[in-house]
Amino acid sequence: EIVLTQSPGTLSLSPGDRATLSCRASQSVSSTSLVWYQQKPGQAPRLLIYGASRRATGTPDRFSGSGSGTDFTLTISRLEPEDFAVYYCQQSGNSPFTFGPGTKVDIK
Amino acid sequence: EVQLVESGGDLVQPGGSLRVSCTASGFTFNTYDMNWVRQAPGKGLEWVSHIGAAGRTKDYAGSVRGRFTISRDNAKNSLYLQMNSLRAEDTAIYYCGRLYTTSSGKALDMWGQGTLVTVSP
């Protein structure tokens, strides 16, 4: 089973700041298999990035994904008020299709 | 409108059974693989199960294998999760998700609103 570790657990930032979220895998993950989701309280998750770097339909261009192998990054260039949420990475290449524990981005 | 709607969540006793459903609309259901993902109260996301578009391929997380069964009825645009031998640790919101697959990657691009399953005496 591929274990995903996300850091930091919580990121306290202000609107307009840049956010850098990390997702590390216990073994190499194909770049086509790394996904990022956003979840707000009381809502279902929403797809942000797939294939490590491809924005899903409707994802603003302030969100970008990068990385390969075991290290992946989600960057939010300038935080908007609606971006404060929990972000999960997932690997969709090898069963079980594991999620990371999440990074909460909250308002400083 | 393109959407997924879960139903069937309930309070059930440990050792009991429950079937949750997911009804799809607004897209060609029988061309998409589907997944179940759950989230325990206050916790993160856990992938539970996968089924292929035709219903022939199925896969499960180790924590539910042998107890849960995924199925679908493409004529009814519906996805199901039959849960047997339920345990307290199965308490969660259960989400269905549509698997979007391209040469560039695959991901759950549409989610339902979830249905709550509570396992308690």
Image: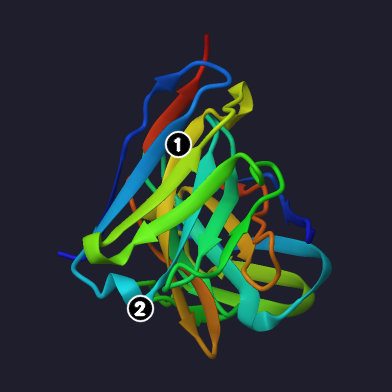
**Viewer can see residue A77:** yes
Using the image as rendered, state which of residue B67 and residue B25 is in the foreground. B67
Q: Residue at x 52, y 43 (%)?
A: B38
- Residue B9 position, x and y percent, is 36, 32
Of circles 2 and 1, which is in front? 2
> Quadrant of residue B66 in the image?
top right
- Residue A76 position, x and y percent, is 53, 66
Within 10 angstroms of label 1, few (less than 14), some, or many (20 or more) residues?
Answer: some
Q: Amino acid at mark 2?
A: Thr
> Is A68 placed above or below B109 here?
below
Protein chain holding label 1: B
Q: Residue at x 23, y 72 (%)?
A: B27
Q: Dividing the image into 4 quarters, which one contains the N terminus of chain B? A: bottom left
> Is B94 placed above or below A28 here?
above
Q: Amino acid at mark 1?
A: Ile
Report whether A9 appears left or right of B36. Answer: right
- Residue A33 position, x and y percent, is 63, 76
- Distance from the alpha carbon under mark 2 to that under mark 1: 26 Å
Q: Residue at x 56, y 54 (%)?
A: B49
- Residue A23 position, x and y percent, is 71, 62
Within 10 angstroms of label 2, few (less than 14), some, or many (20 or more) residues?
Answer: few
Of helix, strand and loop, which one carries label 1?
A: strand
* Number of disc labels: 2
Residue A72 is labelled as none
The first of marks 2 and 1 along the sequence is 2
**Same chain for the residues under marks 2 and 1 in the image:** yes
Which residue in the protein does label 2 denote? B31
Which residue in the protein does label 1 denote? B93
